[in-house]
Every structure is written in structure tokens, then in C-alpha cells.
Amino acid sequence: MSHTNGRMLKIFVGESEMYNHEALYHAIIKKLKEHGMAGATTIRGIEGFGAHNIKHKKAIDVLSGDLPILIEVIDSPEKIDEIIDTIKPMIKEGMMAVINGVEIV
């Protein structure tokens, strides 16, 4: 089995954040696809807090809100570096983290 050295990009945003009249996480996924990334997964969090230390939590009485969203992307280091420059201006409140040394099998 062949293994390739890759890089993981984790993008943290809020569910209610918008970009050009659409959910930010949808806009980011579209950009990732347009740039030919190998793949991406969007995960809706149950609970979390961000830079403003405001707790975001799913509760029975809350039908919609601002739950944390995590987008994970794994690709070559070069492609991850390129997409960061494209996505960074889109994110106003969230953050990105890069994990080096991801083994792609």
C-alpha cells in the first residue's frame, strides 16, 4: 500500500456566519471544490466556544442557532497552502489550524 505525506486544514466557523448571502461553511466548501481539493468534511458541533468566549450549545428548546462548524480538509501540503490564501479573507470570526505530517493512505 502506498502512503503519501499530506497536510490537514481544520476550519472553525459559526453556523450563523454568512459570506455573500450564504452560509460561510457552504461558501468555503464551494471554494474547496472549485480548487480541486481531494475532499472535505463539514461537522456540526454539539457545543463549543470561540474567540469571544461565548458558549454555543445545542439545546432541546433551540431549533436553530449558532452551533460550531468544523470543516476538515486533507490534501498535499502545496494545495493546502494555496487554499489557505483563498479562504483566509472569507473568515472574519473563525480560525484555521494546520496539522503537518498527515499520512494519506
Image (spheres, rainbow, N blue to C red):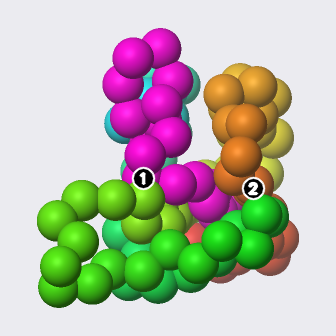
What span is colored magenta in the figure? Answer: 4-25
Three-letter code for the amino acid on which mark 1 is drawn: Glu
Residues at circles 2 and 1 in contact by the CB criterion of under 8 Å: no
Residue 43 seen in the current view: no
Relative to 66, does residue 49 appear above or below in the rendering? below
Q: CA distance from mark 2 to mark 1?
A: 15 Å
Q: Earlier in the sequence, mark 2 or mark 1?
A: 1
Query: Based on the displayed image, in which of its 4 quarters is residue 50 positioned?
Result: bottom right
The residue lying at 75 percent from left, 56 percent from top is 96
Q: Secondary structure at mark 1?
A: loop
> Mark 1: few, some, or many residues within 10 Å (few <14, many ≥20)?
many
Looking at the image, is mark 2 or mark 1 nearer the viewer?
Answer: 1
The residue lying at 50 percent from left, 40 percent from top is 17
Residue 14 percent across, percent down from the top left: 52, 54
Query: Based on the displayed image, in which of its 4 quarters is residue 81 positioned?
Result: top right
Residue 4 percent across, percent down from the top left: 65, 67
Residue 60 percent across, percent down from the top left: 17, 85
Q: From the viewer's perspective, is 57 left or right of 73? A: left
The residue lying at 77 percent from left, 64 percent from top is 52
Mark 2 = which residue? 96
Relative to 6, does residue 19 appear above or below in the rendering? above
Mark 1 = which residue? 15
